[in-house]
Image: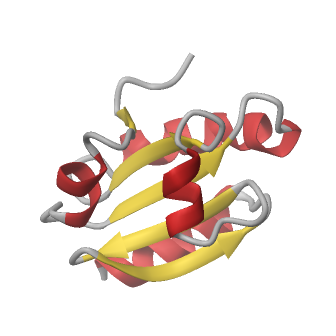
Amino acid sequence: MADANIVTLTDANFPEAVLQSPIPVLVDFWAEWCGPCKMIAPVLDELASEYQGKVTIGKVNIDDFQNLATEYGIRAIPTFLIFKNGQVAEQIVGGRNKRDLKASLDLVTG
């Protein structure tokens, strides 16, 4: 089960939760059938707690919200986009370890 600190992103809440967010947002584009996506989920839960108040962690299920995946050119999953001030500040494609994700988050929060 997802951590309470992780936001489920939809077509309806994406503009406000991501594009208008006052703090950076890491968006995980994932799918239920994706093994690496499931493997990274506990790491995202940890990061959501560690960066609470500094970074929002959100997830977009690409099967449910294909238009968001298309809009942001998602071709492989997991793909992580880090938004800062409504713009994509970084794109990370493929499974990553916690250290790599923290390094990317520290760049946008530092």
Q: Nearer the viewer, residue 35 or 68?
A: 68
Q: Nearer the viewer, residue 35 or 110?
A: 35
- Residue at image location 27% in from the left, 40% down from the top: 12
In this image, 36 relative to 73: left or right?
Answer: right
- Residue at image location 31% in from the left, 58% down from the top: 55
* Image quadrant occupied by the C terminus: bottom left
x and y percentages locating residue 20 in the rendered image: 15, 63
In this image, 29 relative to 14: left or right?
Answer: right
- Residue at image location 79% in from the left, 62% down from the top: 76
Quarter of the figure with residue 34: top right
* Image quadrant occupied by the N terminus: top right
Q: Nearer the viewer, residue 106 or 69?
A: 69
x and y percentages locating residue 53 in the rendered image: 20, 51
- Residue at image location 59% in from the left, 47% down from the top: 66
Q: Nearer the viewer, residue 76 or 93?
A: 76
x and y percentages locating residue 79 in the rendered image: 66, 62
x and y percentages locating residue 67 in the rendered image: 52, 53
Quarter of the figure with residue 80: bottom right
Return the residue found at the far right.
35
